[in-house]
Each structure stands twice: as C-alpha cells, then as structure tokens.
Amino acid sequence: MLPGLGAANLFDWDEINFAEIAREMVVSGNYLQPQMRFLPFWEKPPLFFWLQAGAMHVAGINELAARLPNAICGIITLPLLYRIGSRLYDTSFGWLWALMYLGSLLPGLYFQSGIIDPVFNLFIFLSFWFFINYVWKRDVSMDFQLRRHPLWYLLLAGFFAGCAVLTKGPAALVILCLAFFVYWVWKRFRMYISVPHFLFFLAVTASVSGVWYGLETLLHGPWFMEQFITYNIRLLSTEDAGHGGFPGYHLVVVLLGCFPASVFFIKGWWHRQFDKRYQADLFRWMLLLFWTVLILFSLVQSKIIHYSSMTYYPLTYVAALVVWSMHKHRQSTPGIIVWSVRVLAILLGLAMIALPVIGRNPEWIRDDMADVFAKANLLADAGWTGLEVLVGIALIAVTWWGTAALRKGQALQGATILLLGCALVFKTAMVTMVPKVEAYTQRAAIDFFREKSQEDAYIAAIGYKTYADAYYGALQPDNKPRLEDYSDKEQKSNWESWLMHGDIDKIAYFVTRIDRTTELEELEDVSLLYSKNGFL
C-alpha cells in the first residue's frame, strides 16, 4: 500500500480539494470547521480531513500524507476481511475475500488515493457487519459464535455509523437504513429489531456524529448546517457535482472497475449451497446491500465513479464465495468465466500497451483532434520510455496463468495467481504510468502554482475549475478571497473581476486554459508569461 503513494501529484478535483482542506487546518489551527481558501466549506464533515491533517503533521504537507489515511485504511481492511471470512467459512475463504478486494482494479487502487470513500465505506461496512451480528445474536437459529450481549453489537453498529456520518454526511445512514428496510421487506415485515433497539441504534449514531454537528452549530450558528443540508439535497436531485450520466452508469462502472472479481460475482448471483443458516442469511444481506447502493446512486442525478464504491464489499464477498465453493468441491472453473476474464484482461492490457506507444508518438492522434486544449496537452514531455508496455503484457500473462490453473480445477492456486498478479500489475501502473498521464492533464499548471507559492501574491485560475491554485500555490490566510461564500457564483465572479480590473494591493498571477483566454486577453495591464501544454 505505502510504496509509491507520492509518485504522482494529487488530482483535481477531489484529491486536491480534500488535501487543501486538511492543509488549511494545519496552517490555520482551525480543526473544527472545514475551510476551502480559508472560507467555510460546508460540503463535507471533518473526520477524513482530521486524518489527513494528522498525517501532514507526521509526514509533511505532501502527496504521501494526503493519501496515507487510505493506505492505512487498506492495511486495516484486508486483515479485517480475512478475519471475518475465516469465521464465516475457513481461512481459505478469508484469504480469497481479502485477495478479491486487493486484486480488483478500483477497490485496490482506491487505497492509494486521497479521496474520502475508502474510509467512509469501511465505517459503513463495520456498522453493517455489527448490525448483522446483533440480528444473529437475537435469533437462536443462527449458529454463529457471538459472546457479547446483542446491544453490544448494536452499540458498535451505531458507533461506526456515526463515524461514517462524520466522514461524509447523512448518506451513510441512508444507505444503512435502506438496506435494513429492504431486509425487513424480505422478511415479510417481521420485526427482526424492536423499535426501542432501533431508536438506540439511531441515538448512538446521532451521539457520535452530533459531537461535531452540535458543537459547530453552537459556536457558529445554524448557517453552516443549513448550507450543508441544502448541498446534500441538491447533490441527490441535480448534477451539482459537475458529473451527469446515463441510468446504468454505476452498473457499468462497478462491473468494469471491479475486474476480475466482477466476473465471478455475476456467477454468484445464483449461489444456493450453504452449510449454515447464517451463511445463507449473510449472502442475502450482501446482495441486498449491493443492489441498495447500486440502485440508490443510479437514481441520484450526480454520477461520480466512487459514489457506488460501497458495492465493492458485497461484490468481492460473493466473488470469493464462488471461488471458495469451486475450491471446496474441487471443481474446474466454467469456460465462460475463464474466457470472460481473459478477454477483459486482453482489452485492458492492450489499452495499457497502447498508452506508452501513443505517448511516444502523440502525432499519430494529435493532428486529427478537434479539441485545441487536448491537442496542446499532448505536447507535454511525459517521459515515456517504452518499457511501460511490459505492464500491459504482464497483466495478460498473469491472467492467462491464473485462469489456466482455475480451468484445471486448482481454484485456490489459480485465484491467488490471478489476484496477486493483478494487484502487482495495478500497483506498478500506479507508480509508472499514472504520473505520466498526469503530466498531460494538469502538471504544467501545477508546476506554475508551485513556482509562485513562495511569493506574496494572488494566484487564481480563470475560466476553469480547480483547487490546485490553492493547494500547490500554498494559499495563505492573508491572500484568501475577500468574500463570504466562494461557491456563490456571483461572489466568485466579483472577486475575479476585482483581481483583473480592480486596484489590487499586490501582484496577481492568473492561469487559464488555451481555449478560454478571451477575458484575460482584453486586459491591457496583464502580460503573458508563457504557454505550456494547453495552459497559459
């Protein structure tokens, strides 16, 4: 998890956005109220930013620190899945579940990112797991060894639900309560939890999350909370986050992004062989959680790739169950699964091979591109050596090797080769290929922000949305925007207008895109320093 965390710059928007909030906590000493550009930021609660700020105190304000909380989250998650899986079935199943998570494309890579979701999802999963423990403890027909009183497990479920709410907001409680409701419907409306106990769960959740929500309201009034609630409602009902998509967006993202586990997961929908009643019950819980999350975020208007990442836990669980069942019964893997994995690996591997080839020969596609910004991006010297094609070749090779063993009936050995191989390939791609891709998309602007970060000057990006000017420009409180709400378009426009046309008290540096220069070109007292890879 840890090697290579700082290999690439942080990416707009989310990685830089969250790291900047944590940086501003460190700089200002204000850890209670999240800030962006040293103005109140009411889109997210603070728990994840506290973790990042803590990492920055230890490792410095850099990419490593920004991504460290998720790496630690991965170090916790994988042994946790192994432990739970071993209790449910045996150590082979625990091993397979942890490997399915680590060796799948997006689940493993998210542990090396600086986004909120891995920590958020872990808290939801822990709440979900302990809630199920509570249900099983009260049901004498469930022969699962649980030593504590049922309310102890419900207390833990509420605690981790509260942590999830404190990490990303009320979406955590919506996901959990929807899953509980669907299970209640499946039970034909039989009460598997009493009303007082459910209220106890909600009370614990509210107590944990309310420590911050209540204190924030007490110290700064209701404005922050009102904006936070309004934003979350707007996020559900509009494309406010800047990303729309078709209704099946998340299904496609999950099935492709969770390669190779998703191929086994599809077969697992029809799994019906269980030795214990609690095994069958957890299988239902997992499918309910998967479809609850998938349908919920398919209905939400904002379509962002990591919104559906909570599905990774049930998906990898079911996928591991399929392989474990084949291992237990010494069955060979069906040809349809083997060839589905191979075909997807070949397609992904060819894409990985094509990337450095085109990177070394950008003129093959650049001259035919209509987008002037994208065309200029390809002028960047990303530093491709050509050896990066070995990453794609390695993916195809380990997939072929692992699936060959699966086809021979060596399920555990084949899955281990496949998943460990994929994990190593994806990690190598993160270290060797992602930084080169980043060179095209944003590095020219980031290098400029870094260059000017030591000057007492205003630094602003005009004509496009970015948080890099604040983070890599090392914005200080004295140079923050002189307004109350940076998300208010009118206030932001007035601030930018003052920087460009007003009587400013210090030098101002502007960065824009090559296709959005009209307004700056009209200013007589603004001079062009240089143009690089699509940025001015």
Image (cartoon, helix red, strand yellow):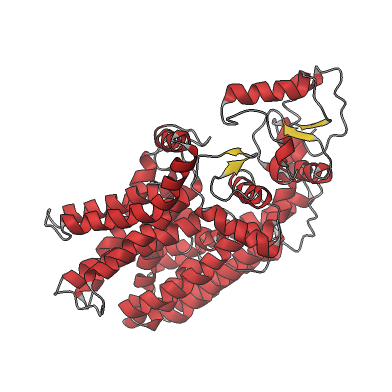
Left or right of 534 in this view: 77: left
Front one among 471 and 14: 471
Quick check: 164 above or below 409? Answer: above
Quick check: 488 above or below 186? Answer: above
Quick check: 157 above or below 300? Answer: below
Residue plotted at (66% across, 61% down): 57
- Residue 255: x percent and y percent? 44, 54
Residue plotted at (32% across, 57% down): 204
- Residue 50: x percent and y percent? 56, 56
- Residue 9: x percent and y percent? 71, 52
Q: Image quarter for residue 411?
A: bottom left
Quick check: 304 above or below 94? Answer: above
Residue extending farthest to the front is 219
Residue plotted at (41% across, 46% down): 214
- Residue 142: x percent and y percent? 18, 74
Count of number-bearing discs:
0
Specify the quadrant that holds the C terminus: top right
Specify the quadrant that holds the N terminus: bottom right
Front one among 522 and 425: 522
> Is residue 105 visible from the viewing direction of this image?
yes
Left or right of 360 in this view: 151: left
Left or right of 168 in this view: 420: right
Q: Image quarter for residue 287?
A: bottom left
Left or right of 397 in this view: 91: left
> Is residue 258 visible from the viewing direction of this image?
no
Front one among 200 and 353: 200
Front one among 283 and 335: 283
